[in-house]
Image (cartoon, grey):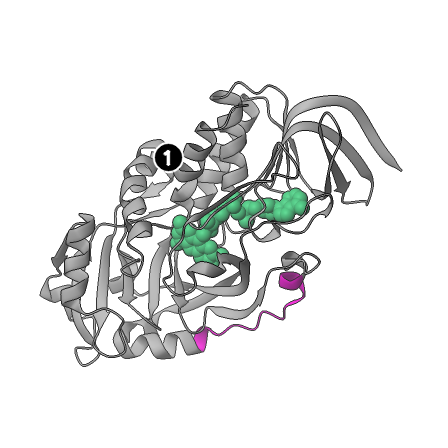
């Protein structure tokens, strides 16, 4: 049986990741919306991509092939540090190393690119350089890049949402969005399979991998998406790597970043982190695909290849893996750019779909929302 409350509320936010939480807080605090319900299918907030990621607060370095993404990161990083100081880890040394062979960028080009985007860069000192294998690494640079603690962002979200009076419905999944003459109709299923309906003036679809998994009148995003099942290994690194974040650029290489919420490091490898991919379409539920995937780790291959560049990585102890679906815009596959997806559904006025390719893109989304009249 479907339960229905006929009154019309201000907004339903679908998805309790960082984006859904930040948007719900923005709508109540800055835009004066009163009755806001946030629906999240998992038992906790920030349980998916907002937790299972590399925790890098980008500062441009990662994107020599996408100037716009690099430039936006430069603008957004200081704002993120200002707004979430407790969740930002700055007390580590960040190195970018340029591979000699098969790199899409040379050391000289990388320096020029960093100067163009105004990002700090200097050659690292000898003690750090000697961690790398000189036959494979052309140059090692000291840069300024930070990490975020997703558990602290989750605690922030919980407190702020409560303070703003947002009603949080955990373990509830939105299955359908439809039009009614005076509102949008959102169908929600709880974990026992009971259905309920909410009528709302606005709906914000902040479901990242789940953006296109609704029935009803929802016709999907215009932007084509690619889904990837990804693995990042969680490593307990040896003392000489403890205080470091390392990225080897720019091609089929790897990154090792502090993962503050577990006190470990993530290891990702461009070749081995993506396990499986498909073009997104309605009816292929990424979360079911992730649940049914066997999740056999590829950490051995990641370590074997990374150790050619950084031999001490062999002394890191494997602890666990974070498996997650990563959603990217098909149009950015070539340049690695991470723009936002912000769509107003013209056939369903009041319904918005959003996706930020990085955590700091939240500012780009909020700027778009600033232009909207609610
Ligand atoms: C492997 C990987 C590495 C990454 N590395 C970085 C990085 O280093 N730095 C960086 O800035 N970004 C990184 N990202 C990107 C970053 O994680 C995302 O940009 C960000 O987390 C997206 O937040 P979100 O709230 O949109 O998504 P999510 O956190 O996934 O939130 C979406 C929520 O919607 C819920 N949901 C889905 N469907 C429904 C439904 N029908 N009903 C109710 N709830 C639903 C889900 O359970 C989920 O909690 C990485 C991503 C991945 C996957």
Structural crowding at the residue carrying mark 1, measured as other residues with C-alpha within 10 Å and reported as few (<14), some (14–19) or many (≥20): some
Q: Position of residue 103 (x, y in %)?
A: 26, 73
| Element class at badge 1 | loop
In this rendering, is residue 77 above or below 251? above
Classify the position of the N terminus by image quarter: top right
| Drawn side of residue 138 relative to residue 39, left or right | left
Residue 218 image-quadrant placement = top right
Residue 331 in view, yes or no: yes
| Drawn side of residue 333 relative to residue 165, left or right | left
In reply to whether residue 115 is colored magenta, the answer given is: no
Q: Position of residue 4 (x, y in %)?
A: 82, 29
158 or 248: nearer the viewer: 248
Residue 45 image-quadrant placement = top right
Residue ID for mark 1: 84
Q: Position of residue 181 (x, y in %)?
A: 75, 28
Q: Residue at x 49, y 54 (%)?
A: 52
333 or 139: nearer the viewer: 333
The residue range painted magenta reads 289-300
In this rendering, is residue 165 above or below 299? above
Q: Residue furthest right?
A: 1
């Amino acid at each position: 049986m479907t339960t229905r409350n006929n009154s019309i509320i201000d907004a339903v936010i679908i998805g309790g990741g960082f984006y859904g939480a930040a948007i719900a807080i923005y709508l109540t605090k800055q835009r004066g919306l009163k009755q806001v319900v946030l629906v999240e299918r998992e038992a906790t907030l920030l349980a998916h991509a907002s937790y299972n990621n590399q925790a890098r607060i980008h500062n441009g370095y990662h994107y020599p092939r996408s100037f716009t993404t690099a430039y936006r990161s430069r603008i957004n990083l200081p704002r993120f540090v200002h707004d979430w100081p407790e969740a930002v880890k700055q007390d580590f040394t960040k190195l970018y190393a340029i591979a000699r062979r098969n790199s899409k960028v040379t050391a000289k080009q990388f320096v020029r690119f960093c100067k163009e985007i105004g990002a700090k860069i200097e050659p690292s000192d000898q003690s750090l350089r000697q961690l790398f294998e000189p036959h494979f690494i052309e140059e090692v640079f000291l840069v300024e890049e930070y990490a975020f603690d997703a558990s602290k962002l989750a605690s922030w979200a919980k407190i702020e949402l409560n303070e703003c009076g947002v009603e949080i419905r955990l373990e509830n999944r939105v299955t359908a969005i439809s039009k009614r003459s005076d509102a949008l109709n959102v169908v929600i299923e709880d974990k026992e399979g009971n259905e309920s309906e909410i009528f709302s003036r606005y709906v914000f679809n902040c479901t990242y991998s789940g953006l296109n998994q609704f029935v009803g009148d929802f016709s999907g995003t215009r932007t084509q998406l690619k889904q990837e099942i990804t693995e990042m290994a969680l490593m307990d690194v040896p003392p000489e790597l403890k205080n470091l974040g390392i990225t080897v650029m720019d091609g089929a290489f790897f990154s090792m970043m502090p993962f503050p919420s577990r006190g470990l490091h993530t290891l990702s490898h461009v070749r081995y982190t993506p396990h499986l991919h498909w073009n997104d379409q309605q009816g292929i539920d990424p979360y079911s695909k992730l649940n049914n995937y066997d999740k056999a780790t590829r950490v051995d291959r990641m370590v074997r290849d990374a150790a050619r560049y950084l031999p001490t990585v062999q002394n890191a102890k494997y602890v666990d893996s974070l498996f997650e679906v990563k959603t990217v815009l098909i149009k950015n596959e070539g340049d690695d750019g991470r723009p936002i997806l912000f769509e107003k559904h013209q056939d369903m006025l009041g319904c918005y779909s959003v996706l930020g390719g990085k955590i700091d893109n939240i500012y780009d989304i909020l700027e778009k929302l600033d232009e909207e009249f609610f």
